[in-house]
Amino acid sequence: MSDNWQASLKRWLEAGLVDTATAERIAAFETARGADAPQGRLTMIAFAFGGILLIAGVLLFVAAHWDSLSPGSRFALVIAMVAVFHASGAVAAAKSAGLSTTLHAVGTAALGAGIFLAGQIFNIQEHWPGALMLWAIGAAVGVWLLRQWPQVVWLALLAPAWLWGEWIEVQRQQWSWGDLTPAAVGLFVLACAYLMAKGPATTESWRRALAWLGAIALIPAAAAVAWGDTEIRFYDREAPAASGLALVVAWTLAIALPLAVAWYVRRREAVWILAALAWSLILAQVQSNSDAGELAMYALFAVGAVGVVLWGLRDRQRLAINVGVLSFALAVLGFYFDNLYDKFGRSLGLIGLGVLFIGGGWLLEKTRRRLVAHASGVSP
């Protein structure tokens, strides 16, 4: 059974697929196996921190001895590094689901390192997004075989990273932040789709992980959309822009991929993602080189933050409410620094900033608590 067998068993019991006696026997059997005993937060933190240290230590060991190894030994070491972690995870599954999940997650991390190291061993022609693509395929296989939330997170991170890398490579000679607008819009809408993954009646761990990933990426992605037209060129300033076909493909993926993810996680409720798409497209067109443009930009930030809060209330999701309140606070703070701080002078500006932090922080926290209380029964 999957890691969240308790939630599945509860759902089957409520649907009448199993009776109470059968459900109790299934729960007793799985608990006796110890495969899916509930993990405390401290245990989860220990597993996560231990997994990070484990893969970091292995990679440092490999790097320290890399020059002294022959090409054959290097490749054997790369294969063994991936195989040992996944094999250990399979063995640990009978005793501890948390340990098994951690080892499989480390194995997928080792796969990425192995792909890049294999390219170095065989002097494969450089195209670094291709390595991300292979890594994402490996994570997708992990999702299909293991059905564990770290594999879902790996896939949710690697697939957009691969597409972002391909877009950079298409325009390598004229790369600028302005040329990254399609990727920034796609990333923002995808973050919104991830945030939608955890509905009011869902308890799957992979949905919760996706929601957290979306919450973390939402604000930086919105900032990338807002300043996506800034002219910061790192290569040839006179180089021609990307071809029309490349732009069509980029915008198609930027729109289609988040919509597909939103439909998968929420079905008909995915229609609400169109509001996020429209908001990001409007924000991408706002010019920040004038006072009116800056005012419109920060107004859009505030409107978007309110929209996230409303979604959290509708979905009874505390995480979305917190992200929305934080986004609104950052929008007000950014507007103050860009438009008011210099006009007040240094001393009055600092006084106003202090009042803003104390008074605004108190008001926002009071509002946040009231909103969270209204959305009763949510989990963080």
Image (cartoon, grey):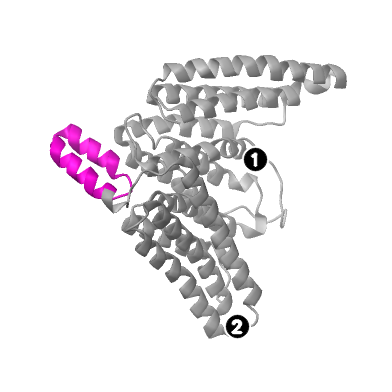
- Report helix, strand or loop for mark 2: loop
Residue 19, position in %: x, y? 13, 36
Residue range (magenta):
2-31
Where residue 116 sits, quadrant-wise, is bottom right
- Report helix, strand or loop for mark 1: loop
Residue 107, position in %: x, y? 46, 63
How crowded is the residue under tag 2: few (<14 C-alpha within 10 Å), some, or many (20+)?
few
Q: Are the residues tagged 2 and 1 within 8 Å (C-beta)?
A: no
Q: Earlier in the sequence, mark 2 or mark 1?
A: 2
Where residue 196 sits, quadrant-wise, is top left
Return the residue found at the far front: 32
Which is in the foreground here, disc 2 or disc 1?
A: 2
Q: Residue at x 41, y 62 (%)?
A: 138
Q: Mark on residue 333?
A: none
Please tell me which residue lies in front, 39 or 72. 39
How crowded is the residue under tag 1: few (<14 C-alpha within 10 Å), some, or many (20+)?
some
Q: Residue at x 54, y 22 (%)?
A: 303
Compared with 359, 268 (above or below) is below
Please tell me which residue lies in front, 204 or 139. 204
Residue highlighted by disc 2: 69
Residue 332, position in %: x, y? 66, 22
Where residue 143 sits, quadrant-wise, is bottom left
Q: Left of 300 or right of it: where is 14?
A: left
The kind of secondary structure the magenta stretch mainly shows is helix
Q: Is residue 36 magenta?
A: no
Residue 340, position in %: x, y? 77, 20
Residue type at mark 2: give it: Leu
Please tell me which residue lies in front, 67 or 185. 67
Q: Residue at x 62, y 30 (%)?
A: 286
Compared with 242, 74 (above or below) is below
- Between marks 2 and 1, how big is the CA–CA gap? 47 Å
Residue highlighted by disc 1: 229
